[in-house]
Amino acid sequence: MATIGNSNLTLADLAAQTEPNGGKLSDVVELLRQKQPILDDIPWVQCNDGSSHKSTVRTGLPTPTWRMLYGGIGATKGTTAQVVDSCGMLEDLAESDKDLIDMSADPAKARLNESRAHLQGMAHTMASTIFYGDQSANPERFTGLAPRFNSLSAQNADNIVSGGGAGSDNTSIWFIDWDESTVHGLYPRGSSAGLRHTDEGVDWTTDSADATKKFKIYRDHFKWDAGLRVGDWRGVVRVPNIDVSDLGTLANTKNLITWMIQASERLDPVGRGVIYVNRTIREKLRLGILEKISNNLTFETVAGKRVMNFDGFEIKRCDAILNTEAAVA
């Protein structure tokens, strides 16, 4: 049975704590969740070292010994690795013509409406970084999931189920167990709810068509300091190398179910398990429901909401997942 909700602290929870009487930040959070549903699932944890989070990640289990009578045993230990996950700073400015806003019956709502494109851009950028951010290539960002699950010979390769595609027209399906012990978001120590809005008030700006002319604007500053921690790689399963050009037939759509079964068997959620796919894959899965290609792929009504479900995992669409991924080898 699919579940809706999360016992961990989400972005909406943080916004409610920051603005207990409501306000623009709560409206902003709601817009972000609408644009990228993954932002509704992530539990957020405050960094333990300023703008970074230091942790010990389990990489291997100790091996016990079968003992015979009068036989001894040796001490064993598991293997761990020290990991530091850093936060990046995502910011944007929204500027609206003052006269346009002042003519509105609800200036605050009008300013939010003028900010929608900026908010959509922030939501997409954050979701994209959650999947593809690579701090080694872009030091100002944080490292997302794909660089951590990007080798079929790595230590976590058992949690990568390859779809067999080659070239650069591939996509992935992601199984994620959101929990403070497995995978969660980060925000800097002392940060206010991770996402912050500042009303910069009224200012003059230059006409883009004529630098000698100016007009008054309202300016809003949006700032989101965030990172991602994978405390236990067993909390993520990636199904990469899905060649989108091969999904035109029902037979190949059925392959998705095979790979998803393999992935679900590799994930035993301790928190909230969710499957993320892009528009292309979700469309194929919906058509698969019509064709009854799998009994464990269904639509269910949960808490009054219609959700797609597979093996007890809710399937959510996330358009930040690309159709142009390079093959994982």
Image: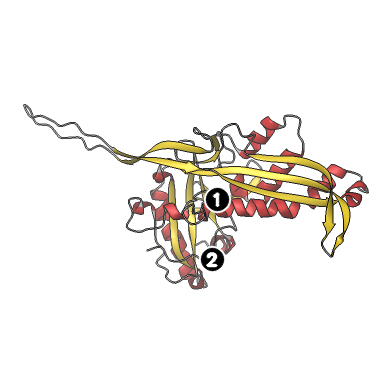
From this view, report whether residue 220 is shown above or below residue 251.
above
Q: Could you tell me how far apart the alpha carbons at marks 1 and 2 are, in whole angstroms? A: 25 Å
- Badge 2, how many Cα within 10 Å: few under 14, some, many 20+? many
Q: Is residue 257 above or below residue 189?
A: below
Q: Nearer the viewer, mark 1 or mark 2?
A: 1
Are discs 1 and 2 less than 8 Å apart at CB?
Answer: no
Among the two numbered marks 1 and 2 on one chain, the one whose residue lies closer to the N terminus = 1
Quadrant for the C terminus, please. Answer: bottom left
Which kind of residue does numbered mark 1 sit on?
Glu
Q: How is the image coloured?
A: secondary structure
Residue 47 on image: x %, y %: 52, 35
In front here: 89 or 298? Answer: 89
Residue 114 relative to residue 77: left or right: right
Q: Of all residues shown, which one is farthest toward the top?
A: 70
Residue behind mark 1 = 140
Q: Please name the residue shown 25% across and 37% down the image.
A: 62
The residue carrying mark 2 is 323
Q: Amino acid at mark 2?
A: Asn
Pinpoint residue 40: horizontal percent, then vertical percent: 61, 44
**Residue at the extreme right:** 103
Does residue 174 appear in the picture of this structure? Answer: yes
Residue lying at 12% horizontally and 32% vertically, measured from the top left = 67
Q: Is label 2 in a helix, a strand or a loop?
A: loop
Q: Quadrant of residue 150?
A: bottom left
> Is 79 or 294 nearer to us in this picture?
79
